[in-house]
Image (tube, coloured by chain):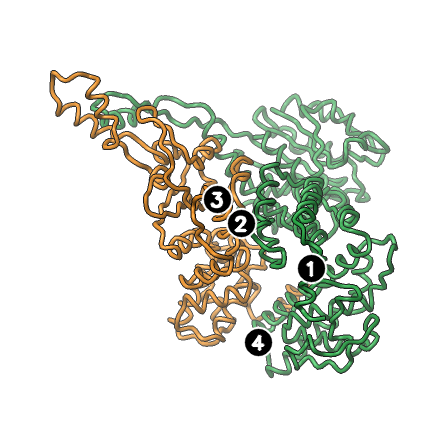
Chain colours: A orange, B green
Amino acid sequence: MCAMTHRFESVEAVREGLAQVDYLSDDSIAGIAYLADRLGKPVLIEGPAGTGKTQRAKSNAEMTGARLIRLQCYEGLDEAKALYEWNYKKQLLRIQAEGDGVEWDDVQEDIFSNEFLLERPLLEAIRADDPVVLLIDEVDRVEVETEALLLDYQVSIPELGTLEAKQIPLVFLTSNSTRELSEALKRRCLFLHLDYPDLAREKQIVLTKVPDITDNLADQVARIVRSIRQLELKKAPSVSETIDWARTLILLGIEKITEQDAINTASILLKYRSDIDKVVKEYSSNSAAHFQASGS
Amino acid sequence: MTPAAANGATADRIESTDTLFELLQGFVQDLRTAGLPVSLSENIDAAIAVKHIPIEDRNAFKYALAATLVKNNSHWKTFETLFEVYFSLRGREYSLGSDGDDDPFDNPDYDPNEEGQDGERGMGEGGGQGLSPEELAELLFQALMKGDEQLMRALARQAVKRYAGMEPGRPVGGTYYLYRTLRNLDLDGMMERLMEQSRQEAGELTSLEERLERDEFESRIDKLKKEIEAEIRRRLVADRGAEAMAKTLRKPLPEDVDFMHASREEMANLRKAIYPLTRKLAVRLARKRRHQRRGQLDFRRTVRHSLSYGGVPAELVFRHPRPAKPEIMVVADISGSVAAFARFTLHLVYAISGQFSKVRAFVFIDGLDEVTKFFEGVDDITQAVHRVNTEADVVWVDGHSDYGHALEVFWDNYGKEISSKSTVMVLGDARNNYHASQAWIMKEINQKARKLFWLNPEPKAYWDTGDSIVGEYGAHCDGVFEVRNLRQLEKFVDNLV
């Protein structure tokens, strides 16, 4: 591991690199990639949906010019889908094509060779020659038993022997925390909790992602979204929903958001009926209701 | 003192890595005592990480430590507080005492409009005598109005110096000083002034604008409060030393907070913690249900899979089993001190109601009422729980807990609906105010129901003391559990399904 050259010079360099690929980071977000690089450890990113966890990994790949290999996790993911699998059908064809009179040993040696090996994302990542970033998305969806498999840099295939890693890729795992991940997994990772961005950062994000927006409108968008997030909702608006909302407002030609605009377009920010109702109730211009709400 | 000199002093203080290492060990030790599971390898990671990030870059340093040591977001606050305690004296800008006092606001002539000159302005000695309370309030007003964070930070220090009345060696907790400082600042009045000002500036505010402004000012005032808290902590650490402070600051993690003795702030945190908890629990239970042993052979899918093996059924496919779901009846005491506990339990049970074929809820004090209808077709459980507390008809005579009578009503009205499929949960401290216990009802229920559990939010040591008769009821239950915090509640519900 020591022989590996480091990818980043300093925390500042990471931050600037990320900014160049349009990802606005803060101290914790930039620092962790630097640290992951220096310590040679995977990064586990946890947080509510839509705060840019996956984007974080993608931007990192884009920034370093590395190839992104993505493993989407799901319930029932197993070795065959994550690590490697023998190409069964091709092997069958090979045996049939051989015909009679060939020794079993030859055939066996032949059909268990690299040609018949289907590399899955994990194996692909550690055997790649070019720099790669491995993204293991939504790791909380796999079973606890499968977790152990995901961070193995040394793969043993009975028929081929042990395959050594050619490189230790930069690994990002994301989790929506639908379940508690195992202690073992957490212990091996650096941990980053990605929450909704603060006002200033969200405004910056809107300004970067929605080119035509005015500074004033972006500010208002960010403020309203923050205010909505403070309500107790089933699903708070995510960053991508904020951006969608800003785009919609631009399309509608709105320059200054009134209550009515906010209420009319609330369905872009919120995806549950009860949430929308709540916001409409809070924001309808009845000032008595308003004072009650802010007073409690 | 110039920044460069201050930097030098800091460098001296942490010059040897040994000192830093020892400091880190103390820090990790305290994290562990606070309940964070820091393993040996994480400790080593942290030790390596601090070599790569200079301590002068405080934020990066903090996040580096957090990345290696804190693996659960609900532990973040504990970490942050302890971090402040251990490392607060070590950043350049945070030095205090006679040498580090480059505070421009000791100078009465200070004009907040001239920013960027802070360092060069003269300074008075001795705890901000130069600034009258009115001037301080005025400066604070302007800082909040403009959202000038540097000025806010400096004013927070100033306010603590002036109002907290901190004396070295005085055995008082930080909250006392915080209270004194905040009382003098009158932030509520400040809020109104701020709103008034922005109303004037903008002419007329629509209610949306008004609301946004208010949110903005609230967040600024929050920031100010945090600064004040941090300042008090810094001073206390300087006075007493980090280890001693860490002890007094130790607060339980959200999942360990006692339901019956939670402060208002802790309650708010609990409410925040319960939502992700229920979600996690629901997913886990659904998964557990699906993954228990295999079901019957799924013939159709087995044949379908065999096609890719040339017609050989090499891969057998099984159906997922669907075990029957239990029916739940929750009978909860919602009087006084146990109300919070009932609320959380109802919340949790309803959040995972998908795991049960039916959930019925009853609440009582000395009378009993069914509240199932409040939860039906409602998306927002918080709202439903609120309605339970305000609308349910639970008072019979005097509004003091009477378990005996409540059980009687329950048995008379709903007893016949208990079947061998129902699991009955009674929630309460069994403090019966010396009424008749009517424990025979519990015995009857237990004979009809599948399971009967009693959850008691009191510590086990208090059971059967005074008017608590949980032992008498418990004799007829399948289990009596002490459920004082979220952790225990989660564990119980997990086993229930």
Dot placed on the residue nearer the N-terminal end, 1 or 4 = 1
Residue at point 61% right, 51% down?
Answer: B383
Is residue B144 positioned above or below A10 on the image? below
Q: Nearer the viewer, mark 3 or mark 2?
A: 3
Q: Secondary structure at mark 1?
A: helix
Where is mark 2, residue-wise? Answer: A192
Task: Quadrant for the N terminus of chain A, please.
Answer: top left
Q: Nearer the viewer, mark 3 or mark 4?
A: 3
Q: Amino acid at mark 3?
A: Gly
Residues marked 1 and 2 touching at CB (< 8 Å): no
Is residue A1 positioned above or below A106 on the image? below
Where is mark 4, residue-wise? Answer: B206
> Rounded to the nearest whole Å, what is the CA distance between mark 3 and mark 4?
54 Å
Q: Amino acid at mark 4?
A: Thr
Where is mark 1, residue-wise? Answer: B10
Residue A40 numbered tag = 3
Q: Nearer the viewer, residue B162 or B56?
A: B56
Residue B451 appears in view? yes
Residue B427 lies, in percent from the top left, at 70, 35
> Rounded to the nearest whole Å, what is the CA distance between mark 1 and mark 4?
50 Å
> Rounded to the nearest whole Å, what is the CA distance between mark 3 and mark 1?
30 Å
Residues marked 3 and 4 touching at CB (< 8 Å): no
Q: Are marks 3 and 2 on the same chain?
A: yes
Residues marked 1 and 4 touching at CB (< 8 Å): no
Few, some or many residues within 10 Å of mark 4 (<14, 14–19, 20+): some
Q: Are marks 1 and 2 on the same chain?
A: no
Q: Amino acid at mark 2?
A: Leu
Task: Quadrant for the C terminus of chain A, please.
Answer: bottom right
Residue B368 appears in view? no
Dot placed on the residue nearer the N-terminal end, 3 or 2 = 3
The answer to which quarter of the image holds residue B176 is bottom right
